[in-house]
């Protein structure tokens, strides 16, 4: 991936295995979020391909990828602050409603039934991530940790099979980070493949079955938590700096 004369990613080959929790780590500016943006359709790669189940999906829009079961959260929260927490999560389920514009405008019975089902499903996801008590509050009044979980609930409402989490523990206190670790495990146990970008090494080492390490847009190392922890290049480039 290039931006003008800047090479943001170079020569990276990365395989996400179904059913795993995998992480991407590296110093600031290493290309982690850029990699997520390429995979999830925010950017079209300058060269190379993104394959999903063997199909070339390079540059496909995020909504098309969502229909194939790909969802994500963002490093900077993407929450509609003037909407209720419940409505935010319902927005994540819109692709499953199956109702056209005209029935919605006419408030037909099928539309009302679908809306009720979407609300029930949204509440279930909010309970799952632990923010159901905030359901009727506007998002702009929620604690930061609850907003992080709310964004995950919205992503889960789209019923993904592959979920990308961009720094889910950023800004959380130690107790909230432990709860986030447990939530990631719970998501994986539901059969969702999880890939996260994260700086908190305790969290990364505690949840990841495989870790990709980037440095200056290139792959520095890849392996299990133990292999990455013991890699002297990783220690020098990243872990050794705290």
Image (cartoon, rainbow, N blue to C red):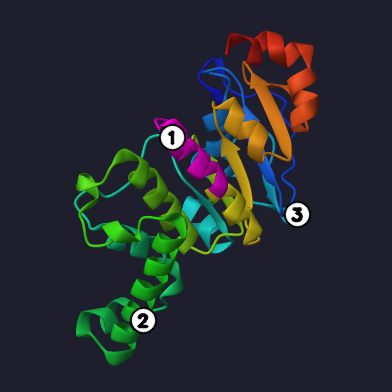
Residue 44 in view, yes or no: no
Which numbered disc, 1 or 3, marks the residue closer to the eye? 1
Image: magenta residue range: 169-182
Residue 94 forms part of the magenta stretch = no
Which residue is at 45% across, 37% downward? 175
The crowd level at tag 3 (other Cα within 10 Å; few <14, some 14-19, many 20+) is few
Residue that sits furthest to the front in the current view: 175
User: Along the line of sight, which residue is nearer the eye, 232 or 37?
Assistant: 232
Which secondary structure, mark 1? loop
As drawn, 156 above or below 145: below
CA distance separating discs 2 and 1: 32 Å
Which secondary structure, mark 2? helix
Task: Tell me the number on the disc at residue 54.
Answer: 3
Task: Tell me the number on the disc at residue 137.
Answer: none
Q: Split into 4 quadrants, where in the image is the N terminus?
A: top right
**Label whose residue precedes the other's in the sequence (3 or 2):** 3
Q: Is residue 66 left or right of residue 92?
A: right
Which residue is at 41% across, 31% downward? 173
Which secondary structure, mark 3? loop
Q: Is residue 215 left or right of residue 148?
A: right
**Quadrant position of residue 131:** bottom left
- How far from the left and from the top, in percent, is residue 31? 57, 24
Q: Is residue 196 left or right of residue 78?
A: right
CA distance separating discs 1 and 3: 28 Å
The crowd level at tag 1 (other Cα within 10 Å; few <14, some 14-19, many 20+) is some
CA distance separating discs 3 and 2: 34 Å
**Residue bearing the label numbered 1:** 75
Which numbered disc, 3 or 2, marks the residue closer to the eye? 2
As drawn, 200 above or below 74: above
């Amino acid at each position: 991936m290039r931006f003008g004369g800047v090479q943001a990613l170079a020569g990276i080959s990365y395989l996400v295995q179904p059913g795993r929790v995998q992480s991407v780590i590296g110093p600031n500016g290493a290309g982690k979020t850029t990699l997520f943006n390429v995979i999830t359709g925010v950017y079209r790669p300058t060269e190379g391909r993104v394959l999903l189940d063997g199909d070339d999906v390079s540059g496909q829009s995020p909504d098309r990828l969502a229909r194939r079961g790909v969802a994500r959260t963002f490093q900077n929260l993407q929450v509609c602050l003037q909407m209720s927490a419940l409505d935010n999560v319902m927005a994540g389920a819109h692709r499953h409603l199956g109702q056209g514009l005209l029935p919605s405008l006419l408030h037909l019975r099928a539309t009302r039934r679908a809306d009720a089902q979407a609300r029930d499903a949204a509440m279930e996801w909010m309970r799952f991530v632990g923010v159901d008590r905030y359901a009727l509050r506007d998002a702009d009044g929620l604690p930061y940790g609850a907003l992080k979980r709310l964004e995950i609930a919205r992503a889960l409402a789209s019923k993904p099979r592959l979920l990308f989490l961009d720094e889910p523990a950023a800004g959380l206190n130690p107790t909230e980070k432990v709860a986030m670790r447990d939530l990631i495990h719970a998501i994986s146990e539901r059969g969702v493949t999880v890939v996260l970008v994260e700086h908190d090494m305790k969290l990364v080492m505690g949840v990841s079955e495989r870790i990709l390490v980037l440095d200056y847009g290139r792959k520095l190392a890849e392996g299990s938590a133990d292999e990455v922890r013991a890699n002297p290049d990783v220690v020098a480039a990243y872990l050794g700096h705290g």
